[in-house]
C-alpha cells in the first residue's frame, strides 16, 4: 500500500480532529468490535427514536425509547458536527464518558454519518489509517440498498482495508457477515453506484417522508 496515501488517512480533518480528547480516545478498547459496540451505545439513530420500541428495537437492544425526554431534539445532526462537539456533549450528560450502560436520555441522536466520523477519529488517534465511506447498504432492508455511511481502516498486519459498521447492534445470525469485517460486495460504494447508474444497471430515487432517504435498486 502506498505509504503517502496511508499517512494522509492517519491525519485528522476539522471533523475528525480529537483535540483535548486524543489521549482519552487512545485508552478506549483496542479490539475493533468492542470499540464499535461501545461507540454504538452512545448514540441513538433518529429512525430508532422515531420507531420507539418496535422493529429493530423491539427487544430494546438500543434501550427504552420511552425514556427519551419529550423536550429534547429528535435529531441533533446539525448541532454536533465535529468529534470534539459530540464527545464534549457526551461528557456533559454523563461525566463517565463512553460507557456501555449509558442511559437513553443521555445519548446523542445522530445518524450513521456521525457514527462513522466518530469511529474514524478514534481509530486515527490509535495510529490507524482510517476514513469515512459513503454509499448504500443492501443488508439493512431486504430488496433495496439504503443510504449509509461506514468506516474503513487499514490493517497493516493483514495488508488490507477493512470495512466496519458501528451504527447498529447486529446479533449472531442477523447478518451473513461480520459487521466489523464487511465484505466489499456487501456495501455499495457511492462511486461504484454512480458508475452503475450511468451504465443503466441501477436506479436511485428518494423518499421524502418522514425524512429524505435514498434508495438504490439494482437490476440483474
Image (tube, rainbow, N blue to C red):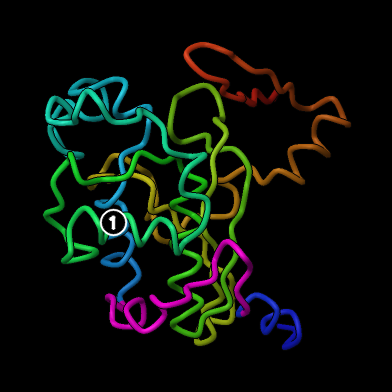
Q: Is residue 44 left or right of residue 199?
A: left
Q: Is residue 98 left or right of residue 79?
A: left
Residue 180 pos. (x, y %): 40, 60
Q: Residue at x 61, y 25 (%)?
A: 214
Instruction: Please report the bounds of the magenta region as a residue range.
Output: 11-30
Q: Compared with residue 147, is residue 26 higher up or lower down, i.e. above or below?
A: below
Q: Compared with residue 74, is residue 133 higher up or lower down, i.e. above or below?
A: below
Q: Which residue is mark 1?
A: 90
Magenta region, main secondary structure = loop
User: Where on the picture, by quarter, is residue 57?
Assistant: top left
Q: Compared with residue 90, is residue 145 higher up or lower down, i.e. above or below?
A: above
Q: Residue at x 51, y 57 (%)?
A: 82
Residue 205 pos. (x, y %): 69, 18
**Which quarter of the image is occupied by the N terminus?**
bottom right
Q: 210 or 214: which is nearer to us?
A: 210
Q: Secondary structure at mark 1?
A: helix
Neighbour class for label 1 at 10 Å: few (<14), some, many (≥20)? many
Q: Residue at x 38, y 47 (%)?
A: 167
Does the magenta-highlighted stretch encompass residue 63?
no
Q: 186 or 63: which is nearer to us?
A: 63
Residue occupying the far right of the picture: 198
Residue 70 pos. (x, y %): 22, 23
**Which quarter of the image is occupied by the C terminus?**
top right
Residue occupying the far top of the picture: 209
Q: Is residue 82 left or right of residue 109?
A: right
Does the magenta-highlighted stretch encompass residue 17?
yes
Q: Residue at x 54, y 85 (%)?
A: 156
Q: Compared with residue 98, is residue 49 higher up or lower down, i.e. above or below?
A: above
User: Where on the picture, by quarter, is residue 90?
Assistant: bottom left
Q: 213 or 42: which is nearer to us?
A: 42
Amino acid at each position: 500500500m502506498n505509504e503517502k496515501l496511508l499517512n494522509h488517512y492517519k491525519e485528522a480533518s476539522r471533523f475528525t480532529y480529537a483535540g483535548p480528547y486524543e489521549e482519552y480516545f487512545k485508552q478506549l478498547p483496542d479490539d475493533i468490535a468492542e470499540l464499535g459496540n461501545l461507540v454504538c451505545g452512545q448514540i441513538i439513530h433518529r429512525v430508532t427514536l422515531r420507531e420507539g420500541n418496535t422493529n429493530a428495537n423491539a427487544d430494546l437492544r438500543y434501550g427504552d425509547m420511552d425514556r427519551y425526554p419529550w423536550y429534547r431534539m429528535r435529531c441533533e445532526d446539525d448541532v454536533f458536527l465535529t468529534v470534539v462537539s459530540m464527545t464534549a456533549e457526551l461528557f456533559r450528560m454523563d461525566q463517565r464518558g463512553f460507557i456501555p450502560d449509558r442511559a437513553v436520555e443521555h445519548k446523542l441522536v445522530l445518524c450513521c454519518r456521525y457514527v462513522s466520523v466518530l469511529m474514524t477519529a478514534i481509530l486515527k488517534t490509535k495510529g490507524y489509517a482510517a476514513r469515512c465511506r459513503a454509499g448504500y447498504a443492501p443488508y439493512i432492508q431486504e430488496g433495496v440498498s439504503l443510504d449509509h455511511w461506514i468506516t474503513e481502516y487499514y490493517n497493516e498486519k493483514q495488508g488490507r482495508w477493512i470495512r466496519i459498521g458501528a451504527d447498529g447492534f447486529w446479533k449472531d445470525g442477523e447478518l451473513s457477515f461480520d459487521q466489523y469485517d464487511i465484505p466489499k460486495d456487501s456495501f455499495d460504494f457511492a462511486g461504484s453506484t454512480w458508475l452503475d447508474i450511468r451504465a443503466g444497471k441501477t436506479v436511485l430515487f428518494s423518499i421524502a417522508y418522514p425524512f429524505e432517504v435514498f434508495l438504490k435498486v439494482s437490476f440483474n
